Amino acid sequence: MKEIRNFIDGEFAATGRWFDKLAPYDGKVIGRVAEAGRADVDAAVKAARAALLGPWGQLSVSDRVDLLYAVADEIERRFEDFVDAEMTDIGQPAHFIRHVDVPRGAANFKVFADVIKNVPGEFFEMATPDGRGSLNYSLRRPVGVVAVICPWNLPFLLMTWKLGPAMACGNTVVVKPSEETPQAAALLGEVMNAVGIPRGVFNVVHGFGPDAAGEFLTTHPQVGAITFTGETRTGAAIMKAAADGARPVSLEMGGKNAAIVFADCDMDAAIEGTLRSCFANCGQVCLGTERVYVERPIHDEFVARLKAAVEKLQPGLPADPSSGMGPLISQDHRHKVLSYYRKAVEEGATVVTGGGVPDMPDALRGGWWIQPTIWTGLPDAATVLREEIFGPCCHIAPFDTEEEVLLRANDNPYGLASAVWTGNLQRTHRVAAALEAGIVWVNSWFLRDLRTPFGGAKQSGIGREGGVHSLEFYTELKNVCIKL
Ligand code: NAD
């Protein structure tokens, strides 16, 4: 039984209340987690503020960069510990966690160390009436204590995606991991101590959202900026909290992403990419596809081939190399996803495959397993085509023209990501420009260069992070004017 504690001012701490952490694959308690109360959150923010004004704030950029490289190296040294933490927290196949989640954790520190090392400044000479002139140059300074509020779906990848740039820019942080996935953040505390990150630079408070650790943190007056990943509804609540004190927010929120498959595509690649984008991580990827539009001449073949591929996905334990899919994260989440499965049928869907709960061996019956599901036959106004489900499911609909499919793909309140499958270069550029989404993948999915801007359009996000774009949020740009 693990004990997972808060990490405040360089020390692991627990002050009384605990909650259980359950394994998604069998529903059994695997550990208990210290819940941070208001006083713990206050202590974490104060420690972060003190570190900002103290040793961390005094470090040169190159010393900070060296320390971030050391964090990345230590993550790589403890790679299997992070794999184990993520496997037991989210229950997904080890090969997915080894190839996607944990390597990105280390990369997030390295990439932003490189960004901050290489960022250019600006410099202007200006004439003055006395003829001596003045010099202006810009300085990037930290915004202060950054609150990092994280979701559960790719816990380590998404948390470090915020920590890397925040720390590279010289800020100090207080992280609130999801209550479902506390382990990687706690391990990261050990990493920070091992490499000599000064006390108070990195803090972790565990617990829930409303009227709990999340809200205590986002409403704390000494928090300088809030970066959030999660549901759009939560993002809106956090934006309201940030309005007190007029603090900046960066919000990465929900999606209802469309894939558009044209008849001139490479069908094998489109099937493989759509399979991953709908079902990887049991469909719990913000960038995943839930709406698939296929040009009519290849629609029936596409449905048949995707169905065959999905039916080969075997549910299994994370460490089992034959496992093609893990369970959903929690009982509540399965309840929500199954309610959409029922709604789809009520609204007239044809269930091509799945639609329920798989029959699992006795030892795993307590887990939150679910069948990957494909529907056809729904009108665009159907609930499962409008709302984010965040489960292993998609609806496939035929289309006839480019103009028509663009209207249908854009007719949604979300605008996070899209995937387009086509062999036509001119169409690629037309469609990529017209889609209302922060990211458009063409003939690919989930290919990420961390120097590129990342974020959502419409209700999927506010702001862009990635490469130099992260500097806009994590630094205050200051002008220094010197009269000569
Ligand atoms: P969630 O919004 O329920 O929770 C996210 C975090 O916010 C958790 O740590 C939670 O405890 C905290 N929280 C909840 N209410 C709060 C409040 N009032 N004040 C402060 N903190 C609060 O999201 P989730 O269920 O953990 O994650 C799934 C969602 O995240 C999906 O909608 C998915 O699309 C989205 N997501 C988006 C991206 C992206 O990059 N755009 C990436 C991953 C996940």
Image (cartoon, rainbow, N blue to C red):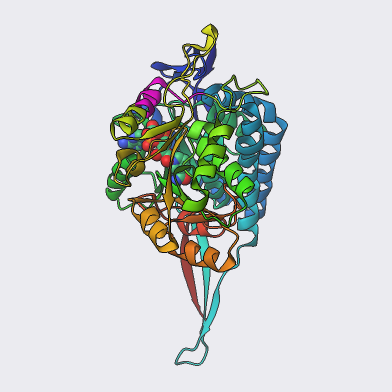
Q: Nearer the viewer, residue 373 or 83?
A: 373
Residue 373, horizontal then vertical, whole percent: 46, 31
- Point out the stretch of residues depicted in magenta: 327-338
290 relative position to 94: left or right:
left
The residue under the point 67% across, 40% down is 72
Asked if residue 302 is positioned above or below residue 4 in the image, the reply reads below
Q: Quadrant of ligand 1?
A: top left
Q: Nearer the viewer, residue 58 or 388?
A: 388
Q: Nearer the viewer, residue 148 or 92?
A: 92
The residue under the point 52% across, 7% down is 362
Residue 35, horizontal then vertical, whole percent: 40, 22
Note whether residue 36 is visible. Answer: no
Specify the farthest residue to the top.
362
Residue 273, horizontal then vertical, whole percent: 58, 44
Residue 223 position by quadrant = top left
The residue under the point 59% across, 56% down is 451
Is residue 71 located in the magenta-colored stretch of the structure? no
Number of numbered discs: 0
Residue 16 position by quadrant = top left
- Main SS category, magenta section: helix
Q: Quadrant of the N terminus?
A: top right
Asked if residue 481 is positioned above or below residue 258 in the image, the reply reads below
Asked if residue 7 is positioned above or below residue 125 in the image, the reply reads above
Residue 209, horizontal then vertical, whole percent: 34, 31
